[in-house]
Amino acid sequence: MTEKCHHLTYREAGDGMAFDEARAFCTVTGSFVQPMRADVCNARYGLDPETDCEFYVEAESSPDGSETGDRDR
Amino acid sequence: MTYEDYRDGKPVVITAALTGGVHGKEAHPDLPEAPGEIATAAAACEDAGASVLHLHARRDNGERAFSTERFQAVADAVRDATDEAVLQHSTGGTGAPDALRHEPLRTDPAPEMASLDMGPLNRYERLTSENTRGLVASLHAEMRERSIKPELEVFNDGHFNESLAMLEELDDPPYLNFLFGGGTTSPPHPRTLLNRVEALPEGVEFNVIGFGPHQLPLTTQSILLGGHVRVGLEDNRYYERGELATNEQLVARAARIAEELGRPVATPEETRELLGLRGR
């Protein structure tokens, strides 16, 4: 994968928080993403969610591809 | 730096790490990210006793930024908001290409200080910040060229070895920053810090970071051992268990402890003299 993660969305609110500017939100963990991790989600600098993100790997390898939600980041 | 420095009442340099490059407002709603927010926090921390301001830059949405342009915006805002404090730019950047890691050094004027990560460290489950010897050397060369004092970031004993091997290349006094916490940082225990300080060559100044709950005890120990301290929301979000802190509160507490223990808090002018800085 060289494109941004398909589990990434940008939201102004969620997980009990609200922001003026839309921020990176992971639909696997059900939470906003730390700035350092957002570079992986966006596949910046050659980073690749498929190999560099444990949440992506876990979600994609689960039998039904289900999202785990509410995971500690 | 020794216990004798403590007994002699040597001033303590307090560095405020205001923002960092790992977490953001998702972890602490008041963590300063925009240049104006960082400048406001910087001014409050200078008033509370910080003489060095450790700076990172962010995008508008809080994500990491490494460009000279973004660092310039932060540095300009902080210079406008503060009186004399020393600006220290981070050159850290897990996953970022080497070329980008140089950009924080290229503001006008250059920062007086910059961080220099001394080797690899792990992040999360699948990331490593490589910090090759080649990158360390090239960052250090540019710092020398631009009269920027490096603060060597010693995350673990391997980095300590790397730092010791580099001492002769450094202007006096070498300034090493010891980091304590989990993962590839040093085990957070007073004994670890004591051993590290005992192994320091004469004439080296040291600073201490303790991540999370280790910030208070290990920075206090550093004061007793003649060292300096770094506090702030980059390293620790809490004032005490369950109570979120502000950068200003963490600096004020460090200053209060230093004064109570008999070491005055270094002014920016004293910091420049102690660390051999070129001036703002």
Image (cartoon, rainbow, N blue to C red):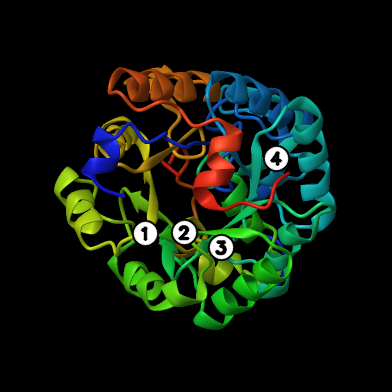
Q: Residue furthest front?
A: B8
Q: Residue B254's mark?
A: none
Indicate whether B150 appears above or below B14.
Answer: below
Indicate whether B145 appears above or below A6.
Answer: below
Q: Nearer the viewer, mark 1 or mark 4?
A: 1
Q: Quadrant of the C terminus of chain B?
A: top right
For the residues marked 2 and 3, what is the alpha-carbon distance in whole angstroms? 28 Å
**In front of the other: B84 or B9:** B9
* In contact (CB < 8 Å): disc 3 and disc 1: no
x 36%, y 72%: residue: B164
Give the amino acid at mark 3. Answer: Thr
Q: Residue furthest left?
A: B191
The residue beneath circle 1 is: B203
Chain letter of mark 3 equals B
Of marks 3 and 1, which one's residue comes earlier in the chain?
Answer: 3
The residue beneath circle 3 is: B94
